[in-house]
Amino acid sequence: MEDIYAELLQKTAAGDQLAFKQLYEKCSPKLMSLCLRLMQTEALAEDVLQEGFIKIWDKADTYTPGKGKAMTWMSTVIRNKGLDKLRSLKTRPVETEAQFEGLEFTSSDLTPDSMEDMSQEMQGLMACLDTLKPSQRECILLSYYYGHTHQELSEKLGKPLGTIKAWIRRGLEDIRPCLN
């Protein structure tokens, strides 16, 4: 299936406002859910989404289709905006049972109904994460899903900073071919 988001993003990079409007209409619900997960309040999530789409408009020309999917690129832009906002507010996303929630997120014991509701992209990501060692998967999820720094993970997991960095780097290297 052709990546319609990539096509719209490339038109946006050329200054096509109609393409940007279509991109927003198609992607904003998914990206808003990411914002809500990070920010925990609708008002902050809406701010982050708006700021993120401004950055997507400004930086659309930096997207390279060969390096990954457009939705992944836009999710990264939005996630980084959210983390910047959290840092500026000196807050952290709310976690419940943080030690285990990250791993549960990647559980392969999902019901058929919930698997059907998930986007193909998310199913692919979860399949890729399942190939990692549990320690790598946990560090990547706590870092990218919850926004913990490497130093925070080192303290939280009681492991040396270098070990945490290596787990994340190697884990990302291992799943990169799977994601393309």
Image (cartoon, grey):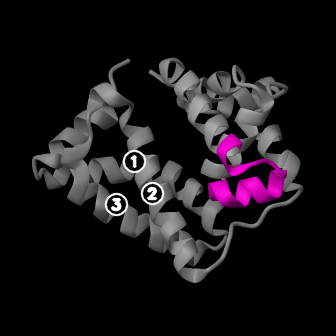
Residue in front for this viewpoint, 110 or 95: 95
Label 1 and label 3: CA atoms lie apart by: 8 Å
The numbered mark, 1 or 3, whose residue comes first in the sequence reads 3
- Can you say whether 56 is above or below 65 in the image? below
Which numbered circle lies on residue 78?
A: 2
Reading the chain from its start, which is encountered first: label 3 or label 2? 3
Can I make out residue 19 in this image? no
Q: CA distance from mark 3 to mark 2?
A: 8 Å
Give the numbered dot on residue 53: 3
Position of the C terminus by quadrant:
top left
**Rendered image: mark on residue 74:** 1
The reply to whether dot 2 and dot 1 touch (C-beta < 8 Å) is yes
Tell me what residue is drawn at x 79 percent, y 48 percent: 159
Mark 3 neighbour class, 10 Å CA radius: few under 14, some 14 to 19, many 20 or more: many
Q: Nearer the viewer, residue 142 or 14?
A: 142
Q: State which region is magenta.
A: 146-163
